[in-house]
Amino acid sequence: LLLVLNAAKHYATIRLTCENRFCTIFNLASSEETFVYQYISKAIVKVHLENVLLERVDKKVLEEYPPFVECADVQNSCAMKVMSVPMNVSCLRIVDTGLSKLEFEERCKLSRLYVEKSKLSSIPRTIRNARSLTFIEITETNVRYLNLATFCDHALLQCMVLKRNRIRYVLNGAARSCPLYDALTFLKLSENRLKSLNLMMFDRFSRMHFLDFSHNRLASVNTGTLTLPTVERFQLSNNRLTGIAFCTWMLPGVSSLMLRNNALTSVPPCMQSWTNITFLSLAVNKLSQFSIDSIANMDNLLELNLASNRLESVRLSGGQFPSSLQRLDISANLLHQLDLSFVPVRSLTVEVGGNDITGFDINSTCVN
C-alpha cells in the first residue's frame, strides 16, 4: 500500500507505506493528519512515524494511534522538540529525534518507554504520572544526573537502563520508604561520566539482581556496611579504580564480578568471603603479584581472568585452592616462571600466552 496526500500549506507530503505487516507514516505535519491511521489494516503489527515535522507533538497524535499496534514508534524526526504522552499509550519508542521535553498525562498507563538519541537534558518530572512503568531505557541523551526519588512511587518498575548518557552523579533524595525499593531488579548505568558512587543508596532495594556501573570514570566507590543479598551480577569494569575493599560488603548471592580494565594494583581484600562467585575478572589492571590465597574458600569459582596485568609472580600453592576452578587466564603478563606442581583440582586449563616463560618443569606438574 502506498498512500500519498498532498497538502498545499506544507512543504512536504504526508505519505503512508505498508509492506507485509509493517507501516511507515512519513512527514506528519499536523495533528489533523492523523486521519491516515484509518487506512492501516488491523493485520499490521508495527507502525512508525518518521520525519515528523511537528515541533510539538500533542497528545492527539498518539491518542489516536492504531490501538492494535503494540508500541507507538517515532524516529528520525529532528524537528520534533516536545511530545505529550496521553493516558492510553502503553508502549512508546522514540529514536533519533530533536526531543528535549517529554510530558506525561496524569494516570498515564505507559508500561514500557524507550528513548534513544535525543536532546533530553534531565529525566522528565512528569514521569511520576506514569506509575505503570515496568521498563525504561534512556540512551544517548544529555541527561546529567539521576535522582532515584523521581521513581519513588513506581511500584511496578523492574528494569532501568540509562546508558551512554552524560550522568555525572546518582542520588536518592527520597525522605520516605519507596515502593520502588521492592520492585527494581535491574539497573544499568554504563557508559556515563560517573566519577564517584555511594552504593549505600542501594541498600534498601530488596529485589535487586543486576548492577552495572561499567565504562564510567569511577575513581572511588563509597560504602559503609553494604547489604545486598539478592544481587547476582555486579559490574565495575572499565573505570579508574585504584583500590576497593569488600570487607564490609555483604553480597552473598553474587555469581559474576567484573573488575576488568581498572587500575587495581592488588586483589581486593576480603573477596574470599564471596563464596558463590563463579566468574571473576581482574583482567587489564596493574597487578604485579597474585597468590591463590587471596581467593581461598571461593569453591564455586569456575573461571578466573588475570590477563593483561603486570604479573611477575603467580603463586598457586596455598592453604585452600578453589575446588571448582576450571579455567585460569594469566596470558599477556610479565611471567618468566610458572609452577603448577600444586594444582589439586581434577581439570584446569591455564592460558599463558603472551608471557616470556623460560622456566617450566612439565614433569612436576600435578597429575590432576
Image: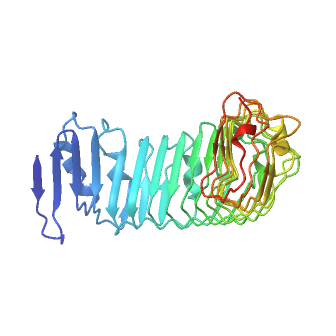
Q: Is residue 269 left or right of residue 234?
A: right
Position above or below: 297 against 188: above
Between 28 and 185, the one lying in front of the other is 185
Quadrant occupied by the C terminus: top right
In the rendered image, is residue 65 in sight?
yes
In the rendered image, is residue 133 in sight?
no
Residue drawn at 76 percent across, 45 percent down: 339
Residue drawn at 70 percent across, 27 percent down: 346
Residue 206 drawn at (x, y percent): 74, 35
Position above or below: 146 against 70: below
Residue 265 drawn at (x, y percent): 79, 61
Q: Is residue 248 left or right of residue 148?
A: right
**Colour pattern of the rendering:** rainbow
Q: Is residue 280 left or right of residue 105?
A: right
Residue 253: quadrant of the picture: top right
Residue 219 drawn at (x, y percent): 75, 65
Residue 324 drawn at (x, y percent): 71, 30
